[in-house]
Image (tube, grey):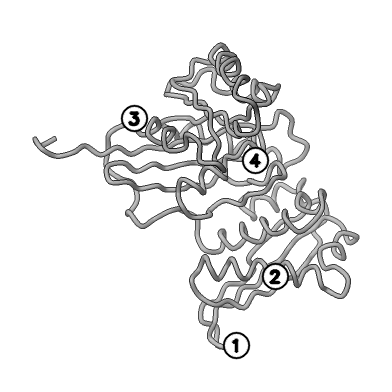
Amino acid sequence: MEQGTVSKKAGYISIIGKPNVGKSTLLNRLIGVKIAAMSKKPQTTRHRILGVLTLKNAQLLFLDTPGIISKAKNELHKKMIKNAVSSLDDADLVLFMTDPFGPDELDKYALELLKNYKKPVICAINKVDLVEKKVLLPLIDTYKNLYPFREIFPLSVTSNINVNELLQSIIKYLPEGEFYYPENVTTDKNERFMVEEIIREKIYSLYGEEIPYISAVVVDEFVENDERHGNVDYIRVIIYVEKESQKPIIIGKGGLKIKKLGTYARHEIEEFLGRKVFLELWVKVHKNWRKDKAFLDRLSV
């Protein structure tokens, strides 16, 4: 390195932890753009999603992963667990996220997956704004005894408590190196994927407990500046469910439910793309798709 030049840092950070501890929320806050679906319901994230944060002298490549679950009930769960665990192979650092209500068995199971990991691991205890301060010091001591973390941060992503401090700590442990991506890149996912994520998130927010988990969203057609629809982007999306009885739940009486879904999703898609779209939603049945490995492979779940 020439005298007077400032070294750059760049590296992959795998965010792992049990479902619903705020991994996607943290990713979106750090990147400054919503690139991962968020919901209060657990297991919203199904894919491994890359978020790229480029600062003056550091590029952080965050891998948001599906929540760690100990037992796979179907092929979808197997794929989600595989996506989460495989992210460790690419990581220069692991960010283990949890909440202040444990540690529970899933926390311990996730830490067991890290027992042979040789690179730095940082612990972030999210949602600390939901508990009294007096519980935090004993909780931090408990996690210190569970795993040799480099650092432990009490955190609240939604209240922006210690988020910047966590970021600076991550940068400290990253290796020196050139940036992997141009400075304007925020994710490696394409527009089709982002449209699917937006619609999935709206399904989580608009429907009951079961529907989000038995539905899959696929962009079937994406035509930019489509002459058939007034030279706006045409996006045809298929929402797959597992049973015929689930279709009318998605559609709603007189089509009102799916119309509401389409309206909410279209507004956010247009905001993300920065242009008008014609969004068309269809509902189809693929019996027991969560158990169909070949179907899941086509979905890239």
Label 4 neighbour load within 10 Å: few <14, some 14-19, many 20+: many
Name which quarter of the figure residue 91 lies in. Answer: top left
Question: Looking at the image, is mark 3 or mark 4 earlier in the sequence?
Answer: 4
Q: Which residue is mark 2?
A: 262
Q: Residue furthest left?
A: 3
Q: Residue furthest right?
A: 245
Name which residue lies at 76% across and 48% down. 290
Single out the mark in the foreground, 1 or 2: 2
Single out the mark in the foreground, 2 or 4: 2
Where does residue 242 sit, x and y in percent of width and height? 82, 55
Q: Which dot marks residue 172?
A: 3
Question: Looking at the image, is mark 3 or mark 2 earlier in the sequence?
Answer: 3
Where does residue 189 sit, x and y in percent of width and height? 50, 55
Q: Which residue is mark 1?
A: 228
Q: CA distance from mark 3 to mark 1?
A: 53 Å
Q: CA distance from mark 2 to mark 4?
A: 27 Å
Q: Which dot marks residue 80?
A: 4
Question: Looking at the image, is mark 2 or mark 4 earlier in the sequence?
Answer: 4
Q: Quadrant of the N terminus?
A: top left
Q: CA distance from mark 3 to mark 2?
A: 44 Å
Name which quarter of the figure residue 43 lies in. Answer: top right
| Marks 3,4: beta carbons within 8 A | no
